[in-house]
Image (cartoon, grey):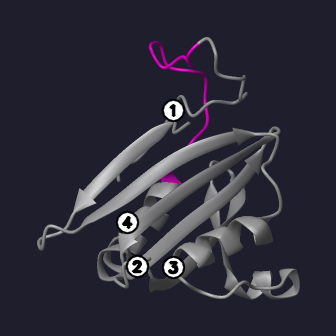
Amino acid sequence: MRAASFRVVGPDGKAVDIGVVPMPGMMGRDVDNVNRWRAAVMLPAVKEEDLAKLAESVPVAGQMAQVYDQAGEDAAGDKSRIVAAVLRREGVAWFFKMTGDAVQVAGQKPAFIEWLKSLAFGPAVAGSELPPSHPPIGGGMGAMGGGG
């Protein structure tokens, strides 16, 4: 279901995983998504009225996306962090998520935010078509700008 995947390996060998996932149908409320990410780093759920305090607005492809930064521990007890942006566009929820070791993710966050700001939606690039069984997602990331 990923439209793109990236991996950044730090000097200590710990990796950060970055994924881009388009989900047709807008995929639920932000509070539900944030609480899933919080559960993954062993943090308590937040109430919808507190969600705005956790959000950072970042321009992505000419629209404002909400970025949520959650740090805690993974199931093994290691310090873990998830930084995720949610962009809702043309009936599709786009998730840009960076996960991994808390220190590595924190170090990559400025580059991740700059990468998000550099993205642009455009016509599909030749050879980037979805598999025939994939549902249409409209407004594909044909012109993914920046690096990451």
Instruction: Please tell me which of labels 2 and 1 falls first in the chain.
Output: 2
Question: Up-down: is 68 above or below 84?
Answer: below
Stretch in magenta: 117-131
For disc 3, the neighbor class at 10 Å (few under 14, some 14 to 19, many from 20) is: many
Q: Are marks 2 and 3 in contact (CB under 8 Å)?
A: yes
Q: Which percent across, then down, holds residue 144? A: 48, 38
Instruction: Please tell me which of labels 4 and 1 falls first in the chain.
Output: 4
Q: Main secondary structure of the magenta part?
A: loop
Frontmost of labels 3 and 1 is 3
Q: Which residue is mark 3?
A: 41
Q: How far, Cα to Cα, is label 3 from label 1?
A: 32 Å
Q: How far, Cα to Cα, is label 3 from label 4?
A: 22 Å
Q: Which percent across, then down, holds residue 18? A: 41, 55
Q: Residue at x 71, y 65 (%)?
A: 33
Q: Residue 17 versus residue 62: which sits nearer the camera?
A: 17
Q: Which residue is mark 1?
A: 143
Q: Please tell me the numbered disc located at residue 111.
A: 4
Q: How far, Cα to Cα, is label 2 from label 1?
A: 31 Å
Asked which secondary structure carries label 2, the reply is: strand
Question: Up-down: is 5 above or below 66?
Answer: above
Instruction: Please tell me which of labels 2 and 3 falls first in the chain.
Output: 3
Q: Residue 127 versus residue 43: which sits nearer the camera?
A: 43
Does 122 appear in magenta?
yes
Q: Are marks 2 and 1 in contact (CB under 8 Å)?
A: no
Does 124 appear in magenta?
yes
- Picture quadrant of residue 99: bottom left
Asked which secondary structure carries label 1, the reply is: loop
Give the residue type that dot 1 points to. Ala
Frontmost of labels 3 and 4 is 3
Give the residue type that dot 4 points to. Ala
